[in-house]
Amino acid sequence: MSTNTKLSDQAPKVENLKTLLSYQEQAIVSRMLVKNTGGNVTLFAFDGGEGLSEHAAPYDALIVGVDGEADIMLGGQHHDVGEGQTLLMPANVPHAVHPKGQFKMLLVMIKEIKA
């Protein structure tokens, strides 16, 4: 389930990433915070037992751990990402997200802009 309201559509205000999106039983919930031609920023909340199978994305991305911890497979290597930690994922490198219980992360996807 995703929500359609973007923070960029609202008046500027300070937000708390931990409370901006709630966990939902047996689900992965996402909320797009920013979306424009340069990329997007999405907050995800994974309930325990939920995750993302291996896939690749055409853009560089940065994961920021917000709550909990996850094992993120990136190019065949395990990376434990927890609250306040980041992991840079290069474009086209296979990756998967396996939370260790409930996990929230911020995903910052950067699209290449050619002049």
Image (cartoon, rainbow, N blue to C red):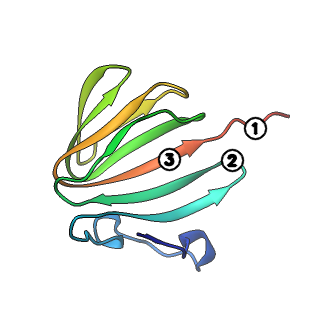
Per the rendering, the mark at residue 34 is none
Residue at the extreme left of the image, as rendered: 101
Residue at 75% of width from left, 38% of height from top? 113
Name the amino acid, label 1: Ile
- Along the line of sight, the residue nearer the viewer: 71 or 112: 71
> Where does label 2 land, which residue?
38
Q: Give x and y (percent) for residue 82.
A: 22, 43
Q: Give x and y (percent) for residue 89.
A: 45, 30
- Label 3 neighbour load within 10 Å: few <14, some 14-19, many 20+: some
Name the amino acid, label 2: Gly
Relative placement, left or right, of 32 versus 102 is right
Relative placement, left or right, of 3 versus 100 is right
Q: Quadrant of the N terminus?
A: bottom left
> Where does label 3 land, which residue?
108
How far apart are labels 2 and 1 at the CA level? 7 Å
Q: Do the residues labelled 2 and 1 touch (CB within 8 Å)?
A: yes
- SS of the residue under disc 1: loop
> Where does label 1 land, which residue?
113
Residue at the extreme top of the image, as rendered: 76
Residue at 50% of width from left, 27% of height from top? 90
Residue at 60% of width from left, 34% of height from top? 58
Name the amino acid, label 3: Val
- Along the line of sight, the residue nearer the viewer: 38 or 102: 102
Q: Mark 2 vs mark 1: which is more N-terminal?
A: 2
